[in-house]
Amino acid sequence: MQLIVTGDMELASLALSLRRTFPDHELNFLPTQKVQDFTSNRLGPHPGRVPGQKTRAQNMAQALISAFEPGRFLNAAPDLVLAVDDLELVNVDQPQVVMSYLAREIELTLKERGLLRADETRVRELLRHRASFHLFVPMPEAYFYAAPSALTLAGIKIASQFDVAGRDTECFEVDDSAYRAWLEKKAPKAVESHRHPKQYLRYLCDPTATIDRAYRETTEGARALEGLAWSEVTARAARECYARALLEDFADGIGADWQSPGPVAPLTARRSGGLLRNL
């Protein structure tokens, strides 16, 4: 199995988190591969190939294709390749653009590879049946609010005011006057901070604004992600649909029985006959 991620926290502990979530299955992961994200800037229609320019999505497309390229693995290609990027606030209103952008990039990258026809056919078949691309919405820290123990593992010092009973963490928004005051001191130029789960987590870990880097992705964040109870995250039927899509797809890929109520996000749900398992 191969994970492809864009963040240091996921690099450190996403594989551990999935192992913990599916303890009855022997999950043998190749070293997690980190590539540059392509969603932190606002995306529009894919520009195609422009001489001298490279899209950031090429890194993700190349990683997905390379996992199945002829000759890379002496014995066999990975049984499953799971790639994930953050949707980010800048693209949170247009996930369909993100998915279409990557699909276009994969097609262009496949053509540039110059594979023999038989090899390209095999790579496409493997991508279709063994590779997926999913979204953390708007970023993985959002899911910590749906599982209180994860916030504890992240090192919060005060209780969160996010309305977890009434809101979907994938539509994160918090109204906290003390947080607004903290922002004036710590991050006065922050944009849409009330919708930013990671920025709010930084406040919860350092409410007095006296500690440098009280929340770090590679330590506190990695610990929280490793211990995240995904069953709690997906326990509410009408919410966290992108997380549910990822987990149901992963479970299907390893032959596990994953039970959680409610629908998956249609945009990243498993489908047949596509470019990837869910694209």
Image: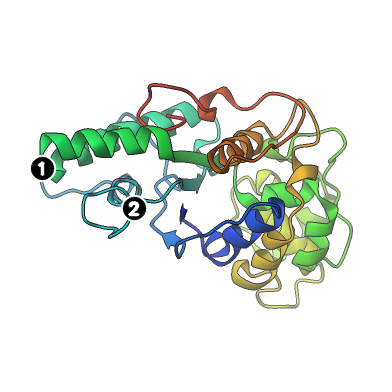
What number is the disc on residue 76? 2
- The CA distance from mark 2 to mark 1 is 21 Å
Decide: is 219 above or below 8.
Answer: below
Q: Where residue 213 sits: x, y (%)?
A: 65, 74
Q: Quadrant of residue 30?
A: bottom left
Q: Residues within 10 Å of mark 2 (few under 14, many from 20)?
A: few
In this picture, residue 156 sits left or right of residue 99: right
Q: Where residue 109 sits: x, y (%)?
A: 21, 41
Q: Residues within 10 Å of mark 1 (few under 14, many from 20)?
A: few
Chosen colour scheme: rainbow
Name the secondary structure under disc 1: loop
What number is the disc on residue 70? none
Q: Nearer the viewer, residue 179 or 7?
A: 7
Give the residue at x 27% y 60%.
Answer: 74
Give the residue at x 56% y 43%.
Answer: 254
Q: Mark 2 is on which residue type?
A: Ala
Q: Mark 1 is on which residue type?
A: Gly
Decide: is 134 above or below 215.
Answer: above
* Mark in front: 2 vs 1: 2
Q: Earlier in the sequence, mark 2 or mark 1?
A: 2
In this picture, residue 162 sits left or right of residue 202: right
Decide: is 273 above or below 226.
Answer: above
In this picture, residue 38 sits left or right of residue 200: left
Q: Which residue is mark 1?
A: 114
Name the secondary structure under disc 2: loop
Give the residue at x 28% y 51%.
Answer: 66
Say whether residue 94 is visible: no
Q: Nearer the viewer, residue 250 or 43?
A: 250
Give the residue at x 42% y 52%.
Answer: 37
Q: Where residue 200 sits: x, y (%)?
A: 72, 55
